[in-house]
Image: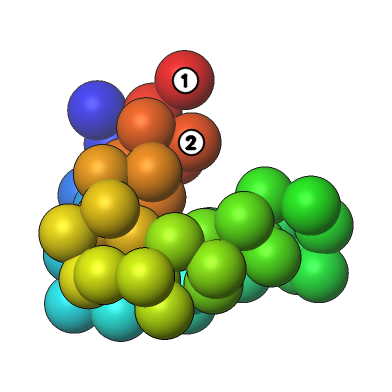
Amino acid sequence: MGTATFIDILLAILLPPLGVFLKFNCAVEFWICVLLTLFGWIPGIIYAIWVLTK
């Protein structure tokens, strides 16, 4: 894991859509993360970390 990945994961924990947005812009992954975060903060975090590390 590099420094960029660590910062991405830290942002994904604090604000899940922001972490995904910085990597994928307004792609489908971002909108899925926004939707999951609206349903609950924990599902948004799980999805954001999964997307950023896959």
Query: Quarter of the image holding residue 49?
Result: top left
Query: Quarter of the image holding residue 52?
Result: top left
Tag 1, which secondary structure? loop
Nearer-the-camera pick, 32 or 39? 39
- Which quadrant would the N terminus be assigned to in this image? top left
Nearer-the-camera pick, 9 or 29? 29
Look at the image and tell me whether residue 23 can be seen.
no
Tag 2, which secondary structure? helix
Q: Is residue 30 above or below residue 3?
A: below
Distance between mark 1 and mark 2 Cα atoms: 5 Å
Q: Where is residue 14 in the image (x, y as percent from the top left)?
A: 18, 77
Disc 2 marks a residue whose amino acid type is Val
Contact (CB < 8 A) between labels 1 and 2? Answer: yes
Q: Position of residue 12 (x, y in %)?
A: 30, 63
Please tell me the numbered disc located at residue 30: none
Disc 1 marks a residue whose amino acid type is Lys
Q: Where is residue 15 in the image (x, y as percent from the top left)?
A: 30, 79
Look at the image and tell me whether residue 24 can be seen.
yes
- Residue annotated with mark 1: 54
Q: Residue at x 67, y 50 (%)?
A: 29
- Residue at the front extreme of this rendering: 39
Q: Which residue is drawn at 48% across and 36% down?
A: 51
- Residue annotated with mark 2: 51
Q: Is residue 42 above or below residue 41?
A: above
Q: Residue at x 34, y 59 (%)?
A: 44
Q: Where is residue 2 in the image (x, y as percent from the top left)?
A: 29, 36
Q: Residues within 10 Å of mark 2 (few under 14, many from 20)?
A: some
